[in-house]
Image: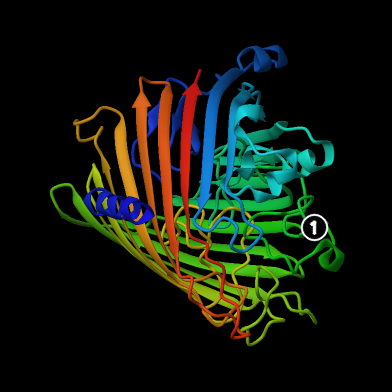
Amino acid sequence: MKKAILSLAAISALLFTTSANATLKTDRVTLKPNMVLEYNKLPSSADNISEAFSNGVFYGRLRLNTFYWDWQNEDKAGNVKDNRAMGLGGSIIYKSAPLKGISATVGLYTSQNPSFYRMDASEVNYLKAGKDTLSRYDTDKTGNFGMTVLAQAYLQYDIAKTSIYGGRQMFESVYTKSNDTKMVPNTFDGITATIKDVEKTTIKLAYLAKQKLRDHTVSHDVIAFNGWEENDDSAVNKNLTVARIGNNNSLSIASITNKSIKNLKANVSYAIVPDVVSNLALEAHYTIPVGGDWKVAPGIRYMQQFDNLGASYDVANLKANHVGYDNATSLDSNLLAVRLDIKNKVFLARIGYSQIADEADIVAPWRGFPTGGFTRAMAQYNWYANTKTYMIRAGYDFSKAKLIPGFSIMARYAIQDFDDKKDGVQADSNIIHIDARQNIGKNLEAKVRLGFVNADDSILKSNGIDYKSDVSYNEYRFELNYFF
């Protein structure tokens, strides 16, 4: 049955193939394919404090996220279990009117977990994709489900083409993303600036003192691991514990994007967690018109990761299993990813490839996936050392083609070639991922996401006796977003 499903999904991927193309545009907001919100209606300027509040604007959102994760071999490894989760809730965001360039934004989010479709409190450790609909730490401590959290609370100062933000906020960069695909976005406590005073150039700066992942109700360290209490992102480096590096680390980022050369978008970004790790990223995308509205766009991303830790203990593997790593005490590594897009207004085809140096895994627990936009598929982490990934993706926007109003579909097929000699890295796998979204009127969007993973179950570990775990599974997601 599973092979039949995979075959049908593969056919869909070849016929159509992070998200389908269509956006949802209401009077107040636009929901982009990557789930980032753009505000179409902003408060008018105020002349006094009273007007700063009375001219403010509320943005309401109701949402539903449902997840079902079906392992092919539920109990083979003894620690996996089919799991399900549902988040029902939404958000209220308030933006005050700017007074002499100063304004404020507050966003309250809630995710509740109906009892008829959730795991028991003792089973939340089995949750995979659905874990972000609740705080596992809170549920484990109190037995209660659901969370309500102030995920945004910041002041903003605008002058000329520069905006400065202070407080809890989203920050989009090559390293960090709000990744708002569940119920609550990934946010940071800190100070950031976006500067557009230089022609065709955007400069972004950030000092991020704390992070608040989607399934946390309070802020935590940006990189230190301590179970579910601190940074427990799925891609966290579990060697970098609070006991070793403390829980007062910060993340600083500088990014410059330039479009001075026609059809070329270039970016240089640098990130550093002092005394732990830093990363320099170079990225460029060049669009070539080829006739009509068709375009070809090659792109490249290179990341160089620098070890600033100088550890006397092993740190190279994210999961703390360092068999097969030549220099396990170093975080030095690099990543190369390339892609080629062929597109017009309604169609996009993409071929992507990425490879990670046979050194350390890439450190990236901030939801800005290193291979995102190139080879990463839904729920996959393909930036382990000596990993090669090949990906093909295609998407068609039936709405823009004036065939089916509000409907679009995207699918991708990825071949993930992990290092068989590294016990701490998963087995080779193929994944098919399909997104279909349907806009209903101006305010409601429905979205279905499917993932089918087929992993190699015949790869021996270094002891020559045990096999790497078979991580084959099917995943099903359904999402509703309503804006008011």
Residue at 53% x, 34% y is 65
Q: Name which quarter of the figure residue 289 lies in.
A: bottom left
Relative to 423, is 274 above or below?
A: above
* Residue 299: % across, % down: 36, 63
Residue 263 appears in which quarter of the rendering?
A: bottom left
- What residue sits 19% from the left and 31% below the top? 403
| Helix, strand or loop for disc 1 | loop
Coordinates of residue 222 in the picture (x, y in percent):
73, 55
Residue 329, position as x, y percentages in the image: 72, 81
As rendered, which of 159 and 182 lies closer to the eye? 182
In the displayed structure image, the side of residue 265 where residue 52 appears, left or right: right
- In the picture, measured across the screen, residue 423 lies left or right of residue 474, that is right
The one of 54 and 319 positioned closer to us in this rendering: 319
Tell me where residue 277 appears, x and y as whole percent: 69, 69
Q: Residue at x 84, y 68 (%)?
A: 244
- According to the picture, the residue beneath numbered tag 1 turns out to be 226
Dot 1 surroundings within 10 Å: few (below 14), some, or many (20 or more)?
some
Q: Is residue 56 left or right of residue 448?
A: right
Where 163 falls versus 415 (above or below)? above
Query: Is residue 102 among the parts visible in the rendering?
Result: no
State the scheme by which the image is colored. rainbow
The kind of residue on which mark 1 rests is Asn
Q: Is residue 85 visible?
A: yes
In the picture shown, does residue 291 fall above or below 19? below
Outermost residue on the left side: it is: 291
Q: Nearer the viewer, residue 153 or 214?
A: 214
Q: Is residue 50 above or below residue 160?
A: above
Q: Please state the total of marks drawn on the protein image.
A: 1
